[in-house]
């Protein structure tokens, strides 16, 4: 966000003021019989992503995880439950408009320093997108498990990978 003499960029503040009261999105991990994860490459952006998108009025994240793939891909995947939920209340979003480093410290620091995203060697094909999905899944898993320290949680998970595999492959996921 651009800083000006009078404070944050007024265009960004006007944009944020026009958003719905709670801004939320949902994505779904879709795997085929061989365990491959579906990753989309939208024509309107450079980043790859999982199927999903913004929640509509009065829609739950779980409902969006069913609706979005149907709109984007023409099918409704089986959704057992939610792996990770995060949201931003309007008062916090206003603070973030003035403190852009919050996202840098909360997510990008974890990606760059703990998971060493910048050192990633996969540079071609779908490798970078697949590794991004895996990193995001790991961060989401540890946060839903209540882990405040992702580095410590990652070290602990590396000593017991069966717990993470069980969490990702079980059909007994819980919903909120």
Image: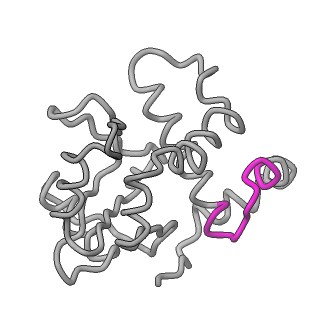
Up-down: is 112 above or below 119? below
In this picture the colour scheme is: one colour
Tell me the quadrant of the picture where the N terminus can be found. top left
Point out residue 160 in the picture as x, y percentages from the top left corner. Answer: 83, 55
Residue furthest to the front: 5
In the image, taking residue 67 as reference, residue 47 lies left or right, namely right
| Residue 134 figure quarter | top right
In the image, taking residue 158 as reference, residue 168 lies left or right, namely left
Residue in the image at 79% along x and 53% along y: 157
Up-down: is 136 above or below 27? above
Principal secondary structure, stretch drawn in magenta: helix
Tally of numbered discs? 0
Q: Nearer the viewer, residue 131 or 105?
A: 105
Point out residue 39 in the picture as x, y percentages from the top left corner. Answer: 35, 41
Up-down: is 59 above or below 142? below
Q: Nearer the viewer, residue 26 or 51?
A: 26
The part of the chain drawn in magenta is 142-154
Residue in the image at 31% along x and 44% along y: 6
Residue in the image at 41% along x and 52% along y: 98
Residue 175 lies in the magenta-colored region: no
Point out residue 141 in the picture as x, y percentages from the top left corner. Answer: 61, 61
Point out residue 107 in the picture as x, y percentages from the top left corner. Answer: 56, 47
Residue in the image at 54% along x and 76% along y: 173
């Amino acid at each position: 966000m651009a800083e000006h003499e009078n404070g944050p960029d007024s265009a960004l503040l006007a944009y944020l003021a026009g958003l719905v009261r709670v801004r939320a999105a949902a994505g779904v991990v879709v795997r085929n019989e061989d365990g491959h994860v579906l990753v989309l490459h939208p024509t309107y952006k450079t980043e790859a992503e999982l199927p999903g998108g913004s929640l509509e009025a009065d829609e739950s994240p779980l409902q969006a995880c069913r609706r979005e793939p149907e709109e984007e891909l023409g099918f409704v995947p089986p959704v057992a439950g939610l792996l990770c939920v995060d949201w931003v209340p309007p008062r916090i979003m206003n603070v973030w408009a003035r403190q852009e480093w919050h996202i840098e410290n909360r997510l990008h620091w974890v990606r760059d320093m703990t998971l060493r995203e910048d050192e990633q060697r996969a540079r071609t094909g779908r490798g970078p997108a697949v590794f991004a999905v895996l990193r995001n899944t790991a961060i989401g898993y540890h946060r839903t498990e209540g882990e405040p320290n992702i580095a410590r949680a990652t070290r602990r998970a590396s000593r017991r990978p069966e717990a993470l595999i069980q969490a990702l492959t079980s059909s007994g996921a819980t919903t909120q």
